[in-house]
Image: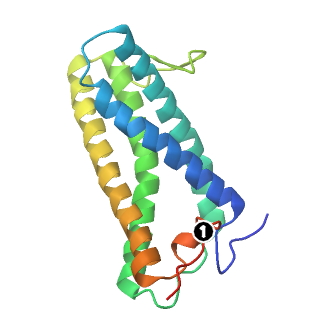
Amino acid sequence: MPAATAIGYTRSAIALHWAVALLILAALPMGLYMTELTLSPLKLKLYAYHKWLGVTVFLLALPRLLWRLSHPPPPLPASVPAWQRRAAHALHWALYALMLALPLSGWLMSSAKGFQTVYLGLLPIPDLLPKDEALGERLAAVHATLAYVLLAALLVHVAAALKHHFVDRDEVLTRMLPWIRRPAP
């Protein structure tokens, strides 16, 4: 398998990154929207879709994490200060943790609330906990908190990438978006 080059990530890493990003960008607003709805067929359908997205994020995050552990990312430009390197490293690992913790908290919450997840409407996923409404409510708070933490981390991630591209004019963003050009100095 090809390793990351000094310029960019491998095609596999890019594909996993954008697949998970798109799923998260669908799941987060759906989660915010559906919780505000009154009980209806639409709300139940959105909850099912949200769970399917979460399970898929979890299933893709595992190989993505394994890929990352076995394939070091391309080096940051020498112009990136050490504190930014440390911050980027910490943020990336936080994102990996959230990509696993958020779906897992949703699965635990659904289990405790007595709502089994049936992936894609076909594959029943076993409950991890017995029904316990009080625990389900606590897990709902954990799930919501993790969702807001993920949203904040994603905003920082995107802002940093845009800052590198438009302010620093380095190749940090183009490593994950090889079809765009580095802005001229």
**Quarter occupied by the N terminus:** bottom right
Question: Which one is in front, 168 or 89?
Answer: 168
Q: Is residue 115 visible?
A: no
- Image location of residue 139, percent across then percent down: 27, 32
Q: Residue at x 45, y 37 (%)?
A: 26
Can you say whether 108 is above or below 87 in the image?
above
Crowding at dot 1, Cα within 10 Å, few <14 / some 14-19 / many 20+, comes out as few
Q: Classify mark 1: helix, strand or loop.
A: loop
- Image location of residue 84, percent across then percent down: 38, 80
Q: Left or right of 26: which side holds 134? A: left
- Image location of residue 92, percent across then percent down: 45, 63
Q: Left or right of 121: which side holds 153? A: left
Q: Residue at x 32, y 9 (%)?
A: 40
Q: Is residue 149 visible?
A: yes
Q: Residue at x 56, y 78 (%)?
A: 182
Question: Which one is in front, 154 or 58?
Answer: 154
Q: Residue at x 30, y 29 (%)?
A: 33
Q: Quadrant of residue 42?
A: top left
Residue lying at the far front of the rendered structure: 184
Question: Tag 1: residue type?
Answer: Ile
Q: Label 1 belongs to which residue?
A: 180
Q: Quadrant of residue 161?
A: bottom left
Q: Quadrant of residue 72?
A: bottom right
